[in-house]
Image: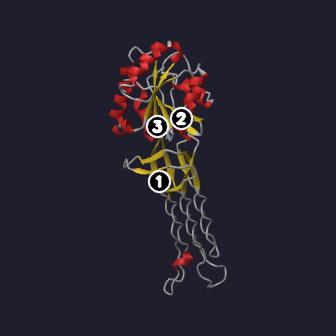
Amino acid sequence: MLIDTSEIVVKGGHGGAGKVSFGKMMGSGPDGGNGGDGGDVYVIASSDITLLNQFSQKKSFAAQDGKAGEKTKKSGKNGNDFELTLPVGTTLIDKRTREVVFELTYAGERRLLVRGGKGGSGNFMFRSPIRTTPKFAQPGLAGEEKKLILTLRLIADFGLIGLPSAGKTSLLNELTNSKAKTAEYPFTTLSPNLGICAGKVLADIPGLIEGASEGKGLGTRFLKHIEKVGVLIHCVSVESENVLKDYKTIRKELGSFNEELLGKPEIILLTKSDLKNKAQTAALVKKLKTVNKEVYPVSIHDWDSMEKTKELIKNLK
């Protein structure tokens, strides 16, 4: 199951302590070295959408601490940086302030998340004509720490939307050679699935229901993934008792969640068209064209209709 929300704690490395030391020779004075800086924590974006699954067990991550200073003015080694890999489309939110830290928008993006603490100065740094034998040094400073909420919104060219059992997952499998689970009952898909068709990324958004914008059926968790898609592919099944009602139900939930979703380009696929004769299918297409001119009957058991759908996707922008 795809995890698309998680909470973690990240911490920069602690700075190493400065050294209190004096040379072995009489009158050689202080020679304690500085502590090394703690490592920083960076985030790197990846196209792997499953990366939030890594936080199902481990929730805390830290860069390496700096090493303490040594004798003969030798500085401690800086701590190693830590790199945390997250999916493209992840928004990082500061849990305390609820402010967005940043959002990862492309694969390979690398951002500094928290800084490590500075290393403390050794006693050599505190020598002076009037303080010839300083017997103290600075401790290292703690690294920055953030408690974060991570939320993933898929970035895809097309989003397959519709009520449960509208045939979205079967369509995705047929168009993209994906292997997503399907079954003859609602809510088989519990997390978004992705596939590639004609070089375009398709996201199968789990079935929405009336009240999804209020959280029913995990609706808000699924609706957020639609915010990043370019074109909506609205699937309505010929098995529906009222195709217009089904269509309007989903449109209402989109608008309630985010009005901007209603402005996205959209086509309607009348799915499972093999279950009706041509006249019945044509009548359903006519009804749906009263709300959207772009309506196309399709069946995964009809090779011609699938090829036409692939061509349609290829040319859509």
Q: Nearer the viewer, mark 2 or mark 1?
A: 2
Residue at 36% over, 27% down: 291
Residue 160, how many percent across, how many down? 49, 30
Q: Earlier in the sequence, mark 1 or mark 3?
A: 1
**How would you rate the neighbour count of disc 1 (Cα within 10 Å): few for under 14, some for 14-19, many for 20 or more?**
some
Q: Name the residue tied to disc 2.
A: 313
Type of the residue with mark 3 = Val
Pick the front one: 35 or 255: 255
- Residue at far bottom of view: 129
User: Taking the image as drawn, is residue 53 in sight?
Assistant: no
Q: Name the secondary structure under disc 3.
A: strand
**Farthest-out residue, right:** 25
Kindly identify which residue carries mark 3.
231
Q: Horizontal and vertical percent for residue 270?
A: 47, 22
Q: Please, what is the three-letter code of the amino acid marked with disc 1?
A: Glu
Residue 24 seen in the figure: yes
* Real-space Cα separation, disc 2 to disc 1, in angstroms: 45 Å
Say which mark, if any, is on residue 145.
1
